[in-house]
Image: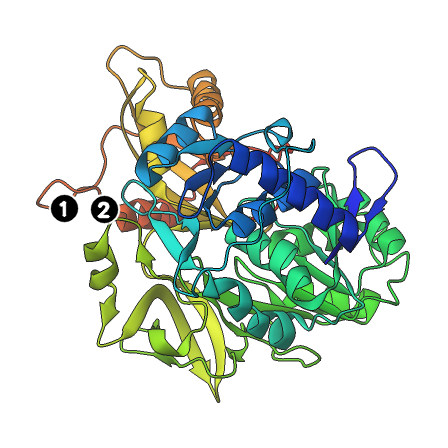
Amino acid sequence: MRALLVPADGVPQPVSAADIDERTARAAAGLAARGVKPGFVVVVRLPKSLEWLVAMRALWRLGAIAVACPHQLTERDVEDRMHRSGAATALLEPADVPGEPAGAPPPSVELGPSAPAFLLFTSGTEGEPKAALHARSYAAANRLQTERWMGVRAADRIWCTAAAGWSKSLRNVWLAAELTGAETVIHEGRFDAAERLRLLAELRPQVLCMSPTEYRMCAAADGFGARPLPELREAVAAGEALDAATVERWREAYGVTVRDGYGQTETGALAGVPAGGAGPAGAIGRALPGVELEVRQGGELWTRAASVPTFFSGYWDDAEATRTRLEDGWWQTGDLAREEDGVLWFAGRADDVISSSGYRIGPGEVEEALRSHPAVQECAVVGIADAERGQIVHADVIAAPGTAAGDELAEELRRHVRTVTAPYKYPRSLRFVRSLPRTATGKVRRSAVRDDLAAHHEGVAEPTDGTWGPGP
């Protein structure tokens, strides 16, 4: 594989396959000298950078298990990931990745396809995210979506804008280029719609993978369509619903059809509008070749685990949680869909996971962060519709006795959430309430919170402040 490193404020730098291999060998030697060996669990919380790519390749070479984490996770989040995974060490900053010679590089470890390789944390609905374990077979199995959905060819330049640490960056920033020999773009800067359009014209990728939010924000930016993108052959999106209006705007401006796709952390890619093809605007496409999908009673999408080459090995140290979602070999995705002549349309979540700007956010994590503030007595977090981000995080908060509820406290709570957990989880909408709707057993009824918001159009929405980044 090859890379094109694009610094936030600098000149793009091509990185050859030989250079990447050499850097990987040095990193593997350095990590081996620190005691990393097959089966060791290593947390990787690095920014999108060449060091991230090298670290993931080096850990693969050593046979270690990489716990891929978004760089925005706080120290508290990292400590939790390390404790729950039993990680022996962590790579938290680029300087943690060995770059100087440290003796002869160890040979690549030869392990079977069922050996563990990656731990990817999901978003939970009621509390801690679950750690999904993927075996080494996951890497080669991603060729299915790389070729049949993304449409990557060996001579291509791929730009997947997903932040490092998400399953989409693992699949589409690293593995898509690794499997095909293509060049992957590593842009170290934050998202800015005008800059993104400029870079697309200058970098001229053949394959583009962005979140629907990024496609929408680019389509609304000044200069959209002003410079042609004649080499852009394939454009794909995933992580949240892709609206038909955005698809049409990109088709009119650049002559390219943005194709949707669908998958999960546990399953990898399951469906998509095929490469080189087109589907009804807004559809997530058809099941990938060989993958069996069914829309069952109630509209939930199920997949036969044995038909999915990238299906996970199970939740880390939680066999019961795995069993509860498997029934006669079929996996309950928790997502709702409808099917028309074999074409699937995403209809939302069956649970409370919030999909915002491509991020999947468990409300339990946000509630925990809010409750850690002394001014919060109780709270409930839900997702509410947003034209730009798909959904935003909303919180209903009961203020602690003696606390003055108002705009000042609302802003303080937003800052607090951004401090104690990843900043993309903070509530852009927040209101203070006297009570929360509960079931007979005392559980908060999030559906009732959503219904009340819809009925009264309440909530104090915060304007975009630039703290979000592209999701998985």
Residue type, numbered disc 2:
Arg
Residue at 78%, 71% in the rendered image: 233
**Mark 1 residue crowding within 10 angstroms, few (<14) / some (14–19) / many (20+):** few
Q: Which mark is residue 439?
A: 1
- Along the viewing direction, whichever of 247 and 96 lies nearer the viewer: 96
Callout 1 touching callout 2 (CB < 8 Å): yes
Q: Farthest left residue?
A: 440
Mark closer to the chain start, 1 or 2: 1
* The quadrant where residue 308 appears: bottom left
206 sits to left or right of 264 = right
Q: Position of residue 403 (x, y in %)?
A: 31, 12
Instruction: Inspect this view and state whether residue 448 appears.
Output: yes
* The quadrant where residue 80 appears: top left
Residue at 22%, 32% in the rendered image: 435
Label 2, secondary structure: give it.
Answer: loop
Q: Farthest top residue?
A: 402
- Along the viewing direction, whichever of 367 and 160 lies nearer the viewer: 160
Quarter occupied by the N terminus? bottom right
Q: Farthest front residue?
A: 104
Q: Is residue 95 above or below residue 36?
A: above
- Along the viewing direction, whichever of 307 and 279 lies nearer the viewer: 307
* The quadrant where residue 331 appears: bottom left
Label 1, secondary structure: give it.
Answer: loop
Q: Position of residue 280 (x, y in %)?
A: 60, 79
Q: Position of residue 387 (x, y in %)?
A: 57, 52
Q: Position of residue 270 (x, y in %)?
A: 47, 72
**Mark 2 residue crowding within 10 angstroms, few (<14) / some (14–19) / many (20+):** few
Q: Is residue 360 above or below residue 381?
A: below
Residue type, numbered disc 1:
Thr
Residue that mark 2 sits on: 445
